[in-house]
């Protein structure tokens, strides 16, 4: 049985439930010193000043807003899914980005901003702005689809991990991931050749000559590629990033071909 995107990232130590509860604690439970005589949560403060918020969607309070749109992020659940976590993040950002918080609440706002930022980076998503709102989307939607189509847990995770910010500038780390993708594509080489000969030739030529499957950097080695070896690390990384995207295309081509074959079984004779 194939793993979903969230199965893959949770297998590497990221827990949707844990992150959801951390956010909930920061937003609903932990109290910051709002004045010298009062403690208040972020949500309570937003509710108190709600009418002064610009993008309040005609609601007269945060309670009214939540009831109108069916939001209740403080409910108890044994299992939260990724979509719920992402909506909760977007909900918090919608309000906290519009408000200047006083006293200890401003510090708490910074903490919750960092928490959301860490969550988004950990799952390979990014923030994009649309109509003055921030939403969170995968950096590489194709990478998510490919990861879910691969039945090898480690390779699935590496497909997603390639886009992680910690790998920027890590030429060897990216090379190792590309080597795993090459090994995964190799059994399907003939099938890919039938589907897209040009892509097949490009990929396997690159695997064999860009220091991925063979040592192309040592002059004493029979596979030495002087032209590639003399490139700067920045240029090599740029080529690896392009090759990674081509690998995604290859996996998608193979997956789509399989689906097309399945659909053909239902054609009218």
Image (cartoon, helix red, strand yellow):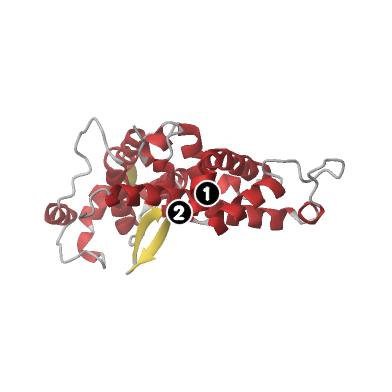
Of residue 252 and residue 65, the one placed in the foreground of this image is 252
Q: Is residue 46 above or below residue 51?
A: above
* Residue at the image point whose x is 65% and y is 51% from the top: 206
Q: Residue at x 53, y 38 (%)?
A: 187
Say which element carries label 1: loop
Give how far apart the Cα atoms at labels 1 and 2 are: 8 Å
Q: Mark 1 near mark 2, Cβ–Cβ under 8 Å?
A: yes
Q: Which residue is mark 2?
A: 140
Q: Which image quarter is the N terminus in?
A: top left
Q: Earlier in the sequence, mark 1 or mark 2?
A: 2
Question: How crowded is the residue under tag 1: few (<14 C-alpha within 10 Å), some, or many (20+)?
Answer: many
Q: Residue at x 28, y 39 (%)?
A: 81
Which of the pair 195/54 is nearer the observer?
195
Label placed on residue 151: none
Q: Which residue is mark 1?
A: 163
* Image coordinates for residue 49, horizontal then vertical, percent: 23, 59
Decide: is 64 above or below 185: below
């Amino acid at each position: 049985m194939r793993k979903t995107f969230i199965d893959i990232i949770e297998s590497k130590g990221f827990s949707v439930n844990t992150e959801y509860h951390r956010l909930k604690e920061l937003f609903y439970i932990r109290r910051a010193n709002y004045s010298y005589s009062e403690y208040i949560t972020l949500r309570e403060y937003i509710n108190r000043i709600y009418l002064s918020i610009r993008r309040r969607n005609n609601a007269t309070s945060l309670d009214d807003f939540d009831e109108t749109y069916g939001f209740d992020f403080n409910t108890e659940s044994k299992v939260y899914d990724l979509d719920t976590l992402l909506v909760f993040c977007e909900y918090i950002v919608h309000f906290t980005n519009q408000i200047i918080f006083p006293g200890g609440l401003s510090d708490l706002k910074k903490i919750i901003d960092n928490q959301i930022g860490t969550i988004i980076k950990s799952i390979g998503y990014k923030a994009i702005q649309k109509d003055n709102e921030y939403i969170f989307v995968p950096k590489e939607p194709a990478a998510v689809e490919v990861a879910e189509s691969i039945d090898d847990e480690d390779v699935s995770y590496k497909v997603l991990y390639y886009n992680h910010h910690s790998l920027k500038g890590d030429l060897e780390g990216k090379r190792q991931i590309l080597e795993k993708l090459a090994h995964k594509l190799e059994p399907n080489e003939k099938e890919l050749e039938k589907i897209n000969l040009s892509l097949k030739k490009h990929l396997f030529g690159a695997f064999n000559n860009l220091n991925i499957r063979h040592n192309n950097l040592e002059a004493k080695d029979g596979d030495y590629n002087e032209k590639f070896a003399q490139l700067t690390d920045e240029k090599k990384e740029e080529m690896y990033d392009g090759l990674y995207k081509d690998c995604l295309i290859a996996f998608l081509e193979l997956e789509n071909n399989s689906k097309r074959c399945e659909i053909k079984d239902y054609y009218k004779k």
